[in-house]
Image: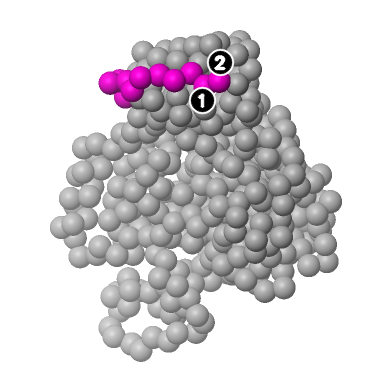
Amino acid sequence: MASVVMNASPRKVEFFRHDLGEEEIASFRDTLSSLFLTTGPRVAEFETLLATYLGVAHCVGVTSCTHGLHLALLALGIGPGDEVITTPLTFVATANAIVYAGATPVFADVDPATGLLDPKAVEAAITSRTKAVIVVHLYGQMVDMKTFRALADRHHLALIEDSAHGVEMRRDGIAPGQQGDAAVFSFYATKTMTCGDGGAVAVRDTNLDRRLRQLRYHGISKDVMARHATPYAHWDMVELGYKAGLSDIDAALLIPQFGRLEQRRHKRELVVRGYRDRLEATPGLSFLRVEGISSHHLCTVLTPKERRDDLLRDLGQAGIGVAVNYRAIHGLTYYREQHGFRKGQFPHAEAIGDRTISLPLWPGLPEDDIDYVAERLRDLMRVGG
């Protein structure tokens, strides 16, 4: 099908804009005037606030969601010779963390209506070497954690939640971290809470919490804040760990955001509703079904496969920031060449990955920008169709 070529537009609708402001600046300034800049009292304060918000016992601040997933796998005893099942419809970090731990990534297909990991496909992929499942709360909507918890218990598997797409989501009255052995979050620049980069791991088990804290600081028995609080005493390194702690500077930016989480989630929901109202009746376009309360981290629209890349280009030429979340991992070069996956293995994930376009989404995106994006996409579909 011929592409619709548009002249470069002077108008610009950014894919994302953060809304950090005076509260974050004041908190940041206070931290710069304090003793600690690294993992210290502000991180501890943030960890307590996040644990309370989620209704879990413990949260451990880390440098990124990727590192959080890696450390969670290690803390749960996952390593060489083990298989970990996850979805191919996610950012590569989910699968990469399995490789970092020395385990083998195994993919299972998704529900074509929601894009979420299919529990039946997961169960069919379980072998004697399977030790864990990483579910992904895609675009901000949770998988059915009751079903996955029962599946994990039935097969004696660890259950990790990749909750990079938000802390605000809920399903069946359940928050991330309340059913999984570990739930891992991202505070990357475009996430629903952000400090530029950073992450956290929520756990219910005290021993797992202790192990994560040790792993995030080189495997050393006593972290910097604990050493500062007491007279000098020799510390020990009891295992090989990593430098992966969230800093007080990051926590200073995150702490003020707790008071606005629901307000911002609601604003993003209004943007998503605006897109759906304007685009759902457009021939050739469709949206995935949303289950439960979504954080609305991303708004993706499914387009005809043969037209998707032309649409990405033409929307970009119209000044509209767009992205793809995500091309299915099993088709990417590394996973094909190093792990033997091939295109066509997971058709539902592949079909979504080949069709999806993520539209601009951030709290307070102006109504006329929503109109502009929807009009341009409708025009392109009409002329190209």
Q: Give 18 or 304, whichever is nearer the viewer.
A: 304
Instruction: Please tell me the numbered disc located at residue 311.
Output: 1
Q: Are marks 1 and 2 in contact (CB under 8 Å)?
A: yes
Q: Is residue 124 left or right of residue 159?
A: right
Q: Is residue 271 magenta?
A: no
The quadrant of the rendering that contains the N terminus is top right
Residue 330 spot, x, y in % from top left: 66, 51
Name which quarter of the figure residue 15 lies in.
top left
Q: Which residue is mark 2?
A: 384
Instruction: Please tell me the numbered disc located at residue 48.
Output: none
Q: Seen from this angle, which residue lies furthest front?
A: 2
Q: What residue span does the magenta drawing correspond to?
A: 2-12
Q: CA distance from mark 1 to mark 2?
A: 9 Å
- Can residue 35 be seen here? The reply is yes
Mark toward the start of the polypeptide (1 vs 2): 1
Q: Amino acid at mark 1?
A: Leu
